[in-house]
Image (cartoon, rainbow, N blue to C red):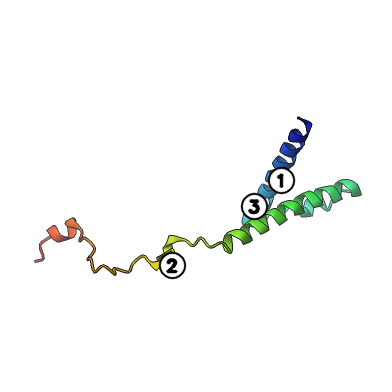
Amino acid sequence: MLFSGIVSFVADAAVVSTSIALFRHFTGFSLLRSANKIKNDKIRTGLLVYLNSGELIFNKSLEMVRNSSFKSLSSDTYNGRNITDNSNNQQPPSSSSSSSWKKF
């Protein structure tokens, strides 16, 4: 019971710290400058470790996504095959609205 509560607290803290890092990444606003103004060394060090751990989690997650084997479908490939390749020589169906217009 106590162990699961601690694990839950640590996971929630990691999510919050990573969210702060995500916010900093997209807006440029950083709490690190504000944290450096704290006069108590132990609190400042703890807060800096907490914020930097979120930065580390965010950066590693972003690196994993960038290096993953999943590529977006906008690259016109799927499992190494070209999506736009009509290897079976089928013509794409023409739009019914464009074929119904008569050219004058």
Disc 2 marks which residue? Answer: 80
* Whether residue 53 is visible: yes
Q: Nearer the viewer, mark 2 or mark 1?
A: 2
Q: Nearer the viewer, residue 80 or 10?
A: 80
Q: Which quadrant is the N terminus positioned in?
A: top right
Q: Secondary structure at mark 3?
A: helix
Q: Position of residue 81 (x, y in %)?
A: 39, 67
Q: Nearer the viewer, residue 18 or 64?
A: 64
Q: Which quadrant is the C terminus positioned in?
A: bottom left
Q: Nearer the viewer, residue 95 or 39?
A: 95
The answer to which of marks 3 and 2 sits earlier in the sequence is 3
Instruction: Report how far apart the C-alphas of labels 2 and 1 lie in the structure.
Output: 37 Å
Q: Amino acid at mark 3?
A: Leu
The dot on residue 46 is: none
Q: Amino acid at mark 2?
A: Gly
Q: Is residue 1 above or below residue 52?
A: above
Residue shown at 74%/39% (left/top)?
Answer: 7
The dot on residue 14 is: 1
Q: Secondary structure at mark 2?
A: loop
Disc 3 marks which residue? Answer: 22
Q: Amino acid at mark 1?
A: Ala
Q: Position of residue 61 (x, y in %)?
A: 64, 56
Instruction: Report how far apart the C-alphas of labels 3 and 2 lie in the structure.
Output: 32 Å
Q: Nearer the viewer, residue 65 or 2?
A: 2
The answer to which of marks 2 and 1 sits earlier in the sequence is 1
Quadrant hosting residue 9: top right
Q: Position of residue 79 (x, y in %)?
A: 44, 63
Q: Is residue 5 left or right of residue 19?
A: right
Q: Is residue 52 left or right of residue 19?
A: right
The answer to which of marks 3 and 1 sits earlier in the sequence is 1
Residue shown at 20%/58% (left/top)?
Answer: 95
| Dots 3, 2 in contact, CB < 8 A | no
